[in-house]
Image (cartoon, rainbow, N blue to C red):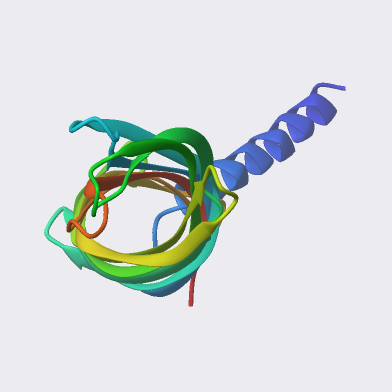
């Protein structure tokens, strides 16, 4: 009976040791990777309020896309580069005052902002903590396209596309899963776009992605 319990303990110990070894093997593997991600987009712009000032206009919605990257070890951390592309469904419609550029008069109207897509490149640098979870910061350059529709009280409207570009910065964490090939990446970033028709547009992205290193 004692020998039977002893054998069971040995088997249980072997299983536990195997599980621990598997978890310990869940480290990020360097090399090229592909990633799919989804999350939340918040686009903020400042628009002419029709009375000589500006008002903040927020459009938000879902975002999903993919990325290709390369991660290389660097000292006690890692460096990497990543190319991304995503579809953006940020949307907002609001009643606004529209100023006639010729007469200077203002009239009631509407503005609708609809996100379209974005793409960009970023460089990242981070360090490993807690079972080699990679915590990193990144910076890069981002392009973004949105569609603006201006409606007037007489029923007419004007639709125009806006192409923004500017610097992007953010932070993230890459969490290894069981095995060395798969990881979850959680990121927050802000893009500061150059002024086009709108004043000082910015975009916040909150995403969760699943990456595979090959």
Q: Position of residue 160 (x, y in %)?
A: 43, 66
In the rendered image, the vertical position of residue 31 relative to residue 134, given as above or below? below
Residue at 53% over, 40% down: 93
Residue at 49% over, 33% down: 95
Residue at 42% over, 34% down: 96
Camera-side residue of 213 and 185: 185
Residue situated furthest top in the rendering: 2
Residue situated furthest right in the rendering: 1
Q: Quadrant of the N terminus?
A: top right
In the rendered image, the vertical position of residue 36 relative to residue 10, given as above or below? below
- The answer to which quarter of the image holds residue 11 is top right
Camera sees residue 21? no
In the rendered image, the vertical position of residue 4 relative to residue 171, given as above or below? above
Camera-side residue of 132 and 101: 101
Residue situated furthest front in the rendering: 103
- The answer to which quarter of the image holds residue 165 is bottom left
Camera-side residue of 5 and 139: 139
Camera sees residue 25? yes
- The answer to which quarter of the image holds residue 140 is bottom left
Q: Position of residue 131 (x, y in %)?
A: 37, 41
Camera-side residue of 135 and 107: 107
Q: Does residue 56 appear to the left or right of 40 in the view shown?
A: left
Q: Position of residue 42 (x, y in %)?
A: 42, 41
* Count of numbered circles on the image: 0
Q: Does residue 180 appear to the left or right of 106 in the view shown?
A: right
Q: Does residue 208 appear to the left or right of 79 in the view shown?
A: right
Q: Position of residue 107 (x, y in %)?
A: 40, 37
Residue at 77% over, 35% down: 7
């Amino acid at each position: 009976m004692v020998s039977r319990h002893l054998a069971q303990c040995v088997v249980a110990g072997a299983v536990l040791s195997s599980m621990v070894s598997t978890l310990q093997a869940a480290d990020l593997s360097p090399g090229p990777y592909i990633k799919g991600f989804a999350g939340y987009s918040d686009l903020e712009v400042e628009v002419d309020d029709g009375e000589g000032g500006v008002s903040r206009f927020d459009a938000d919605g879902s975002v999903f896309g993919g990325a290709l990257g390369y991660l290389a070890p660097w000292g006690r951390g890692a460096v990497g580069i990543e190319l991304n592309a995503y579809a953006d469904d940020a949307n907002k419609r609001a009643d606004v005052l529209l100023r006639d550029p010729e007469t200077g008069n203002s009239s009631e109207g509407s503005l609708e902002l609809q996100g379209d897509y974005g793409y960009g490149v970023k460089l990242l640098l981070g360090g490993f903590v807690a079972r080699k979870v990679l915590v990193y910061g990144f910076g890069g350059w981002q392009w973004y396209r949105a569609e603006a529709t201006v409606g007037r009280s007489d029923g007419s409207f004007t639709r125009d596309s806006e192409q923004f570009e500017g610097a992007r910065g953010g932070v993230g964490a890459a969490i290894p899963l069981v095995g060395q090939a798969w990881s979850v990446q959680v990121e927050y970033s802000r893009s500061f776009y150059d002024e086009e028709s709108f004043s000082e547009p910015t975009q916040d992205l909150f995403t969760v992605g699943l990456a595979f290193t090959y």
